[in-house]
Image (cartoon, rainbow, N blue to C red):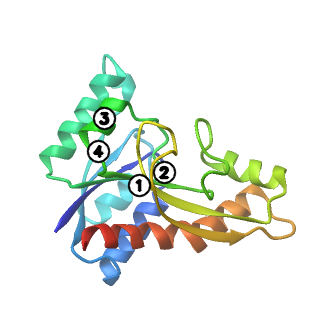
Amino acid sequence: MLKLAVLVSGGGTNLQAILDAIDSGKIKNAEVALVIANKTSAYALERAKNHGIKTAVIRKKDFASKEDAEQAMIDAINAEGCGLVVLAGFLSVLSPKFIRAFEKKIINIHPSLIPSFCGEGYYGLKVHEEALKKGVKVTGATVHYVDEIVDGGEILAQKAVYVEEGDTPEVLQKRVMTEAEWIILPEVINKLANQ
């Protein structure tokens, strides 16, 4: 059984997609053992608690340094025996030390077709604003391994989503979630849990 640590910053819609996929049997041989948020207001914590999943809030400002906060995350993940770290809307860039602690064991969901609209500063609505500004006809989502280059790790899955006439960043964001993110993230986790 592959134990997952899911790192979140906000609402936890991707966490919910993972939980739903586990409950429905789309993800086999995996369980969410720990949810770590870097904000006390993250609704993802409620989603985890509703599923009886252990949670932790680890914020940089509660520690002497970012390194200390990341070490607390490393310790918490290792204490639960997690074999995969899933960044599901985790809005913080991880240090090389953290990444090395879980080499080839951290995946991220990004709301574009990498290499478009990715890298430092590209997260949340900004990705969709830039896609609309550029006038692309197709966008989507990417699941990739996390390495020391922001959004630069090996691509594990991508799914395209068409941009429609009159899309706002918010409408496009929702469509990318429902038509791509919530599909490919569980698919990749299932594949990794059963290889």
Q: Which residue is mark 4?
A: 103
Whichever of callouts 4 and 3 sits on the residue coming sooner in the sequence is 3
The image's mark for residue 137 is none
Q: Where does the image place residue 8, in percent across and percent down from the top left?
A: 41, 48
Q: Is residue 83 above or below residue 30?
A: above
Q: Residue at x 35, y 81 (%)?
A: 26
Instruction: Say which of marks 2 and 4 sits in front.
Output: 4
Task: Tell me the residue that label 3 is attached to.
Answer: 98
Which element is circle 1 on? helix
Badge 4 vs badge 3, beta-carbon distance below 8 Å: no
Secondary structure category for the residue under label 3 = helix
Q: Give the vertical position of 41 relative to 71 (above or below).
A: below
How far is mark 1 from mark 4, CA to CA?
25 Å
Q: What kind of residue is marked 3?
A: Phe
Tell which tag, 3 or 1, sits nearer the viewer: 3
Alpha carbons under labels 1 and 2: distance apart: 10 Å
Measured Cα–Cα span from mark 4 to mark 3: 9 Å
For residue 24, which quarter of the picture?
bottom left
- Give residue 44's mark: 1
Left or right of residue 38: residue 103: left
Q: CA distance from mark 2 to mark 4?
A: 20 Å
154 displayed left or right of 161: left
Which of label 4 and label 3 is nearer to you? 4
Q: Which of the two labelled residues, at mark 2 and mark 4, occupies the earlier sequence position?
A: 2
> Is the C-beta separation of discs 1 and 2 under 8 Å?
yes
Residue 44: horizontal and vertical position, in percent?
41, 55
Residue situated in front as seen by the camera: 150 or 69: 150
